[in-house]
Image (spheres, rainbow, N blue to C red):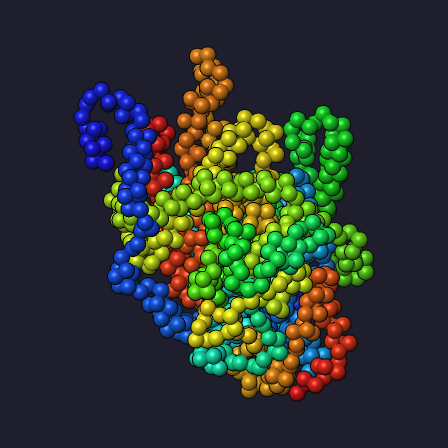
């Protein structure tokens, strides 16, 4: 029996000493959530690479779904900072970030450089056909939202009845107002919300693989554009007064974090403010990860090694 | 309705017909009346706007939530710090210790409680973590589960004992337990972030909330079922109430309490994937990251690792409650690895002989080691006191398995400390099947023939069942639906349930959730109906045919423990997102209990039934349809009841694949960081669950009484 006690003691001491080690390093230790989409993950890994290799920080990465949970975490201080927040998808951000009219319990830490853009897309084979897969061009002159009514019958779904169906914004809280937009623009379509991003992409990918026509909401930069060949449908240019009967505004994505970051880790904030990752840079890495199935950390690391001249300029 | 009720009182020619077919007549009349009202009403029902405005539940909840948080945060954070300390200690031990040693430590309890067969299952389970290269993740999940289960059992047994001692406490705690089990965890995830922080503590909290009820219920039940005579005997011998409880009642209630622990383990494992939503590491992470990248193969790998863990833990905790400790290698009968009926196949027979022989040798070695240890220990103890030595000898010899295990672990630890024989798990032994799974998915998705089949199923379900029922329930005036349910509750159960039903329906209406509530009701009805159509025949087949039963068991186990998130993506890819897919996913989840209860119900009928009915010249089909199925109805209804509960639990998962109903609001509230919006929809689900549960239970009880089974 005494062996068991000793083993228990030994493991307790082990645990305690480990605790001591981690708290000793805590001065330069930051916690950040891994975004659950590839683009955001790339942005985060780039920032973390610099923090760990050039600025002597240790980053504890946490896997959790993006969205309000991340805001609650940064607000309470469990998370120090988070990467690539898209303003139009995070109503929680408006509640907490001062720059967006919130109460200031979450701090704005600078733009990432990635500019997002949402819109409606159709697969290229719908317009141009795809000889290699034997798909004829079923809607050769589909260019803008005005042409949609003409092809409504092609896009029917179970739930839409006789109308055409738009695979709309999956999450109501993203405030896309798809049905309202369609109604205001006079497009006789039914907007279907699939409930989650996963369901959205799964549905699009399955339809694409079967070569079916579809109109779907999507945004860029996103891996779906690396995997599938999609063409954007024209919408009236963005106009705040006419919203939602217009296209989306550009999403200038940003870093945000706990307010104490501003005082305690001003060097980190400086780096995040200086950082300017472009859509093209990110798209290249997304392609390597999602289409060429590379390991995300290795892909970012080799990009960092090859592009030192770019990111050296961001250092505080 | 009233005319129908009057009929009952008037004696007449109808009387015998009425008594025999009362249920059908009422159902038929009700359906006809409802259809007429639906036709007259015409449009979608609208709950009075002024009532909705008078009841700003979501807004008030949000205000309260924001106000109270800063006051309770210090307390919750202190609790969280304790949980983190426990978790990190355990996880560090499991991950940093050499894997061979942890492997042995994990597998030994299975051998100890379940013998060779369970031990082999545990070896397969633990090996799957290594082979799939998910060892660290498995250890994280295992630590999280162990701590959650430990906390649940400690608190649960305490609450259960308290409930067994006070009727008033029991009455208070029962609805709370129901709510804990049916309130979707997504409702309190966002506040949990703030109060308990991200990572393990929040996940432990959510798991404890969900897994606590069964152990409370079964502890309470176990103690209450101790015959009153035993208690009286104890008191007459001068035992105080506390002594009688601790020394007599709780020991007698142990089997029931152990069953509660077993149930708690299974409930806790159902929340593994959810833990990821709170930023907690482990196997759920693999499933989640596979899911969001549409990597079906990866999600399946993670899911299977969870299934293995769940099945092994389930069997081990079940064995702990049922079997006396199997000592060393002692067992009387020949070991059987494969189901009966295969014992004539030569290779299997040799394999079984081989395993049996090895097991006996290991047992002999184990007994020898124990003997050595005992002799040495007693020799040493004799120097001190010979009486103590004699007692020590008895104690040690009775624990041969434990001693042999400790010696084995000690040898492994010494080897690890002083030699370099243990390495990492060899890369060459690792195996990943995600690529073939994904390729197979691709083939299925693009297959024209398969698509034609899925489309036919989809359209049939949608036009045949889902859409009409949706339109029907949403078109019925809200007051009519409420009246039907309230009267039903009164007739089935009594005044209390009728009042509860009324309050429940008014709450759903006044929070502006009527339409979504009706959608939930229709999805649940369609899902349970399909479960019934598929599950009852399967259950009957399994009751009659041993092969079907053996084949079905692992499938059902997997269906029940495979995290639902694993099959969400394949369901969308094959059937498209929408209501049909959510019904199908619900059926997969809710089917197993119905099949199990049906099998059990038919099997438990007395054997004489067959003989009697055969002697009257009935064939097997007649015996089954005229006697056995009617007699098994109470058991089947228990299954239906469980299927309803599980279908309602799925309500919060199906919105992820386009399901519509109250669950959608729960997610919407979560995405807007509004506790009020999630909570009111969550409470709506809880209310529907409790109403449907109580009504079906009351109905089953009257059926049982009518058959004289109660």
Relative side of B170 to B458, left or right: left
Give the residue at x 79% y 62%: B418
> Which corner quadrant of the image does residue A144 belong to?
bottom right
Horizontal relation, residue B384 to residue A103: left or right: right
| Rendered residue at 51%/63% (across/down) | A146
How many numbered circles does the render carry? Answer: 0
User: Which x, y percent locates residue A48?
Assistant: 66, 75
- Between B226 and B592, the residue placed more toward the observer is B592
Residue name at image x 36 percent, y 71 percent: B63
Query: Does residue B678 appear left or right of residue A209 in this picture?
Result: left
Residue appearing at x 37%, y 59% in the figure: B680
Q: Position of residue B149 (x, y in %)?
A: 52, 55
Q: Quadrant of the N terminus of chain B?
A: top left
Q: Above or below — where is A255 with respect to B407?
A: below
Quadrant (top left/top right/bottom left/bottom right) for the C terminus of chain B: top left
- Asked if one can make out residue B46 in the rendered structure from this viewpoint, the answer is yes
Residue A2 rendering spot, x and y as whole percentages: 64, 58
Asked whether B471 or B656 is in front, the reply is B471
Q: Is residue B238 visible?
A: no
* Left or right: A138 as drawn, with respect to B644: right
The image position of residue B395, as x and y in percent, is 61, 46
């Amino acid at each position: 029996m005494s062996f068991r006690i000793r083993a228990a003691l030994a493991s307790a001491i082990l645990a305690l000493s480990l605790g001591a080690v981690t708290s000793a390093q805590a001065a330069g230790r930051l916690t950040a959530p891994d975004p659950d989409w590839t683009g955001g993950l790339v942005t985060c890994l780039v920032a973390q690479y610099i923090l760990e290799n050039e600025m002597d920080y240790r980053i504890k990465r946490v896997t959790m779904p993006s969205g309000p949970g991340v805001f609650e975490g940064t607000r309470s201080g469990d998370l120090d900072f988070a990467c690539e927040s898209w303003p139009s998808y995070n109503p929680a951000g408006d509640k907490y970030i001062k720059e967006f009219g919130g109460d200031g319990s979450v701090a704005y830490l600078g733009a990432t450089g990635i500019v997002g853009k949402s819109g409606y897309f159709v697969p290229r084979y719908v317009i141009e056909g795809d000889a290699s897969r034997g798909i004829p061009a079923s809607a050769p002159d589909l260019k803008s939202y005005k042409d949609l009514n003409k092809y409504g019958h092609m896009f029917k779904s179970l739930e839409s009845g006789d109308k055409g169906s738009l695979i709309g914004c999956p999450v109501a809280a993203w405030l896309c107002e798809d049905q309202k937009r369609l109604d205001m623009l006079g497009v006789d379509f039914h907007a279907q919300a699939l409930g989650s991003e996963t369901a959205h992409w799964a549905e699009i990918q399955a339809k694409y693989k079967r070569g079916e026509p579809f109109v779907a909401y999507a945004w860029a930069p996103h891996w779906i554009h690396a995997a599938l060949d999609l063409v954007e449908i024209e919408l009236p240019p963005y106009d705040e007064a006419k919203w939602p009967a217009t296209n989306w505004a550009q999403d200038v994505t940003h870093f945000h974090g706990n307010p104490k970051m501003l005082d305690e880790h001003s060097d980190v904030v400086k780096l995040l403010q200086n950082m300017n990752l472009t859509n093209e840079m990110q798209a290249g890495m997304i392609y390597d990860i999602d289409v060429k199935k590379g390991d995300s950390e290795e892909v970012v690391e080799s990009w960092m090694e090859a592009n030192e001249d770019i990111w050296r300029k961001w250092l505080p | 309705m009233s005319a129908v009720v009057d009929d009952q009182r008037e004696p007449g020619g109808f009387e015998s017909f009425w008594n025999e077919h009362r249920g059908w007549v009422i159902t038929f009349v009700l359906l006809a009346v409802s259809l007429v009202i639906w036709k007259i009403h015409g449009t979608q029902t609208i709950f009075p706007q002024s009532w909705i405005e008078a009841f700003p539940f979501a807004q008030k909840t949000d205000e309260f939530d924001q106000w109270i948080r800063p006051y309770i945060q210090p307390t919750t954070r202190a609790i969280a710090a304790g949980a983190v300390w426990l978790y990190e200690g355990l996880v560090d031990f499991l991950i940093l210790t050499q894997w061979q040693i942890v492997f042995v430590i994990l597998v030994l309890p299975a051998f100890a409680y379940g013998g060779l067969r369970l031990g082999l299952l545990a070896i397969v389970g633990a090996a799957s973590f290594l082979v799939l290269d998910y060892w660290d993740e498995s250890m994280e999940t295992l630590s999280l589960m162990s701590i959650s289960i430990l906390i649940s059992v400690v608190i649960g047994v305490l609450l259960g004992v308290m409930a067994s001692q006070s009727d008033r406490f029991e009455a208070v705690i029962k609805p709370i337990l129901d709510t804990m089990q049916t309130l979707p965890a997504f409702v309190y995830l966002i506040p949990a972030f703030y109060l308990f922080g991200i990572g393990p503590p929040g996940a432990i909290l959510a798991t404890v909330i969900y897994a606590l009820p069964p152990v409370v219920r079964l502890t309470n039940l176990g103690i209450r079922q101790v015959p009153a005579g035993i208690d009286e005997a104890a008191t007459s011998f001068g035992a105080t109430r506390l002594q009688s409880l601790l020394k007599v009642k709780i020991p007698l209630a142990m089997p029931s309490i152990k069953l509660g622990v077993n149930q708690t383990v299974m409930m806790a494992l159902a929340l593994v994937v959810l833990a990821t939503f709170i930023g907690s590491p482990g196997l759920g992470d693999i499933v989640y990251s596979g899911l969001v990248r549409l990597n079906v193969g990866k999600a399946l790998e993670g899911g299977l690792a969870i299934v293995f863990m769940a099945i092994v833990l389930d069997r081990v905790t079940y064995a702990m409650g049922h079997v006396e400790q199997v000592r060393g290698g002692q067992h009387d009968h020949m070991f059987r690895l494969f189901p009966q009926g295969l014992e004539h196949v030569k290779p299997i027979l040799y394999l079984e002989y081989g395993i049996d022989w090895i097991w006996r040798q290991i047992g002999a070695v184990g007994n020898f080691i124990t003997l050595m240890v005992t002799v040495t220990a007693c020799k040493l103890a004799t120097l001190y006191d010979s009486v103590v030595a004699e007692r020590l000898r008895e104690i040690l010899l009775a624990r041969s398995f434990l001693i042999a295990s400790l010696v084995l672990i000690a040898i492994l630890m010494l080897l690890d400390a002083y030699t370099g024989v243990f390495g990492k798990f060899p890369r060459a032994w690792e195996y990943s099947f995600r690529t073939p799974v994904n390729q197979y998915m691709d083939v299925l998705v693009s297959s024209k023939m398969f698509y034609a089949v899925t489309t036919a199923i989809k359209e049939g379900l949608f036009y045949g069942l889902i859409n009409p029922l949706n339109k029907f329930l949403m078109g019925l005036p809200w007051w009519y639906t409420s009246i039907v349910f309230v009267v039903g509750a009164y007739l089935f159960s009594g005044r209390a349930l009728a009042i509860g039903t009324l309050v429940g329906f008014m709450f759903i209406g006044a929070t502006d959730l009527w339409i979504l509530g009706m959608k939930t009701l229709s999805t649940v009805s369609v899902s349970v109906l399909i479960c019934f159509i598929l599950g009852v025949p399967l259950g009957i087949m399994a009751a009659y045919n041993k092969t079907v039963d053996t084949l079905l068991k692992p499938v059902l186990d997997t269906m029940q423990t495979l995290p639902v998130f694993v099959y969400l993506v394949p369901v969308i890819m094959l059937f498209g997102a929408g209501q049909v897919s959510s019904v199908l996913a619900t059926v997969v989840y809710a089917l197993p209990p119905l099949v199990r209860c049906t099998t059990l119900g038919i099997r438990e009928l007395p054997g004489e039934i067959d003989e009697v009915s055969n002697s009257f010249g009935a064939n097997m089909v007649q015996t089954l349809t005229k006697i056995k199925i009617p007699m098994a109805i109470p058991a089947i209804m228990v299954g239906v009841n469980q299927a309803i509960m599980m279908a309602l639990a799925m309500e919060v998962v199906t919105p992820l694949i386009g399901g519509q109903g109250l669950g959608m609001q729960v997610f919407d509230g979560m995405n807007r960081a509004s506790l009020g919006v999630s909570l009111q929809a969550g409470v709506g689900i809880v209310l529907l669950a409790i109403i449907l549960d109580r009504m079906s239970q009351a109905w089953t009880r009257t059926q049982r009484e009518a058959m004289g089974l109660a």
